[in-house]
Image (cartoon, grey):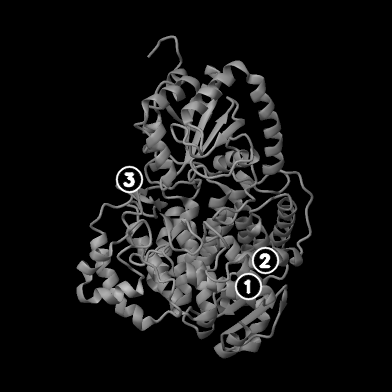
Amino acid sequence: MNPTQSPIQNNASSNRLHTANSTYLKQHSDNPVNWQIWSNEALELARLHDKPILLSIGYSACHWCHVMAHECFEDEQVAQLMNEHFINIKVDREERPDIDQIYMSALTAMGEQGGWPLTIFLTPQGDAFWGGTYFPKHANGRLPGFIDILQSLGTIWKNDRERINGNVTALKTHLQNVLTPEANAAENDESIFQRYADTIARRIDTTYGGISGQPKFPNFPFMSMLWTSWKISQQQQHHDLFILSTEKMLNGGIYDHLAGGLARYSTDAFWLVPHFEKMLYDNAQTIRQCLWAWSSTQNSLFRNRIEEIIHWVTSEMTLPDGGFASGLDADSEGVEGKFYVWDQSEIESVLGENAPEFIIKYNVSPAGNWEGSNILHRLDMLNFNQEENETLKPMREKLLSIRNLRIRPGRDEKCLTDWNAYFVRAVAEAARVFDRADWLELAKSTYQILIPEQGTAISHVWSRTTSKLPALSSDYAALINAALSLYQADPYKNYIDDAKSLLISLNQHHLDQDGDYRLTALDNDDVIFYLYGDQDEAIPSSTSQIIEACTRLALITEDEALLTKTNKLAERALGRSKHMAYGQAGILNAAVLLLDPVKLVLIVEDTEDELYRCASRHADPCRTDIILSRSQASQQPEWASFLSLAGERSCAILCRNQVCLPPVYDAADLEKLL
C-alpha cells in the first residue's frame, strides 16, 4: 500500500468483487478490471480521482452479459483502458433494481434501446452522460468497439468536459421529470382502464397468443389486465385471448416439457425458441395465471402445469438455508440452451420402441427446429388429453433422468425477498384451489424464513449468514400480499397481524411527505433519485403491488381509513401514469379494483366446509375473501346480524362496493353467485 494514499484511494487499484455475496458479481471477481461494488465509497473514489464512472449492470442468468464479460472484461487490453480512465462499478440488477431502473431510464432517454448488460457512463456525482448495452471488443459493422468507446470517452472527459456537462444537465432534468414527476391526481375512471385493455387486446396474436411479433414475453401485467377486464365488464374476447395466450405459451418450447418451468421469453413470434434462462418470478406469476385459467375452463393442462412448475422449483431451486434461488443461466458449457435440446438419435436411443410416439407428439425431427437440434414443444396440440399425458409421462421422466447427467446451467443463489414472496403467494393460492396440504406447508415454511424476527428489518436479499441489502418497497408489498393469501388459505389472525406490521415498516422507510411510496428506502442515501417505482417490468410495478396490498388489507380488516388513503394513493399514481410511455398496466389493474371492491365473507368453522371449498375453486384476483368463525363474526357488528338468519348453518355473503347481497347457505347457490 502506498502510505500517502487513503484506504479508499487504494480500493481503486483492485477488484473488490471478491467481497460480494451476489453470484453475478462473484462471476467477475477474477476479471483484471478493478471493479467496485456500488456504494457511497465507490462514488467517493470517482470524486477523489476525478474520473468518470463506468457502470455495468447485469444479472447472473443473462446470456449477453456473459458474452461481453468474455470478450471485454476478461481481456487485459480492455481492462487496462477501463482502469486507466474510469472507476468501474458492477451492479447486479436483481440486487439493486432501483439503480437499474434509474440508469435504464437514462439510456432510453438517450434514444437507445434498453437491455442487459447495461453499460452506462457517469460523472463522479452519479449523473449519466453516455451509454449502451452490449459492445464487442472491436467494431463489427453493426456495433462500435468497446476499446474505441473507452478511448474516446476518456479523451473527451480530459479535454472537452463542457460537452459532457451539457449532456448531463439536459439528461438529469429529463430523468427527474420521468422518474419523479410532479403530476396532479387523476380520477380513477374505469373507461381509462377499459381503453387500455382494448388496446392490449388488439395487439394480441390471435394464432399464438401473447403480444404480436418477436420476441414474445409472458407479460403478466398485460395478461392480468385482460383477465380483470373480463371479470369486471364481461368482455368475452378478453377472456378468450387470455386463455389462448396462456395455453399456447405452456405448450411452446418456452416451457420445459421435461422438468417443468418457463423460460424468460421466446426469441421468436410463436413461443418456440426460448432464451433459455429460467427465473423464479416468471414461474410464480405463471402459477397464478394458470389458476385463473383453470378456474374458468377446468382444463387439466393448467392444473398439470401448476404441479410441474411447483415440482421444478422445489427440486431445482431450493437453497441450502431455505428459500429459493432467483434463476438459472441460459448457458451451460458456454453454449446457450445446450442443457435442454435434443438430437432425434438421442431420443431414439433412450426411449427405444416408445421413441416414435414421443417424436411425433413433441415435434422432433432429424434436422431439428433450432440450430440443428430439437426444442421439445407441443404447439400443434389442439386439446390437452390427460390420458395421453399420463402415457407420455414415463417417457418424459426417462429423458429427464438422462438430461440430469449433463452439465447443468449455473444457478443464481440469491434468495430475493420479493420474488420468494411471489412464489409463496402463488403456492398458497394453488394450495387453496386444489386443497393441497403439502403445498400449503411449503408456502408457510418459505414465508416463515422471509418474515423477520420482531424488531428486525426485512432485507431485499435474505440470508442467514451474509450481509443484507436494505429492503425495497416491492419487498414489503409482496410480503403483505403473501401474508393475505396465506390467511385466505389458512385462516389464522397472525397473518393479518403480520400484514399490518409490514405496512407500518413500509410507511416508516418508504412513505414520503406527500403520502406516496418510493422504491428505495428514504433513509438509504446512495441513489441520485428516489423513484416511485411506478413502471411495470416483467413484474407489476411496486406502486401497483402496494395499492393491491393496501386494498386487500383494508377490505379484510374493514379499515375505512386505509381504504380512503389507498384510493388517494391510486389517484396520484394514475396522475403520474399519464406521463408514462409504457408500463402503467399494473397501476391501472390495481386502481380499477378500488372502484367496485368485491369481497366474499365466509362464516365457516373450518376449511373443509362446502362453502369454503366452493369459493376456493373459483380463484379470482378481483375478489377479496374474508374467512370468519362464528365467534369471530359475532364480535363484528356488520356480520353478527347475519348469524341470527343463519342459525347453526355456515353462510356466505357477497358484497360489491359496500352493498351486500342476502346470505347463501349451500354451495350450489354460492356457485351461481361466483
CB under 8 Å between discs 1 and 2: yes
Q: Indicate the quadrant where residue 165 lies.
A: top right
Q: Earlier in the sequence, mark 1 or mark 2?
A: 2
Residue at the location (40% across, 46% down)? 463
Q: Locate residue 329, reporting x and y percent.
A: 38, 50
In the image, taking residue 454 as reference, residue 258 lies left or right, namely: left
Residue at the location (70% across, 65% down)? 592
In the image, taking residue 580 as reference, residue 26 lies left or right, namely: left
Q: Which residue is mark 1?
A: 238
Q: Locate residue 519, reporting x and y percent.
A: 60, 46
Residue at mark 2 to residue at mark 3: CA–CA distance: 41 Å
CB under 8 Å between discs 1 and 3: no
For badge 3, the amino acid type reads Gly
Give the camera-side residue of 650 and 418: 418
Residue at mark 1 to residue at mark 3: CA–CA distance: 42 Å
- Give the residue at the far top of this rendering: 4
- Rendered-image quadrant of the N terminus: top left
Residue at the location (79% across, 59% down)? 187
Residue at mark 1 to residue at mark 2: CA–CA distance: 8 Å
Q: Locate residue 537, reporting x and y percent.
A: 57, 53
Residue at the location (72% across, 55% down)? 574
SS at mark 3 in the image: loop
For badge 1, the amino acid type reads His
Q: Indicate the quadrant where residue 226 lies.
A: bottom right
Q: Which residue is mark 2?
A: 197
In the image, taking residue 657 as reference, residue 667 lies left or right, namely: left
Q: Nearer the viewer, mark 1 or mark 3?
A: 3
Q: Which residue is mark 3?
A: 334
For badge 2, the amino acid type reads Ala
Q: Residues within 10 Å of mark 2 (few under 14, many from 20)?
A: many
Residue 170: assigned label:
none
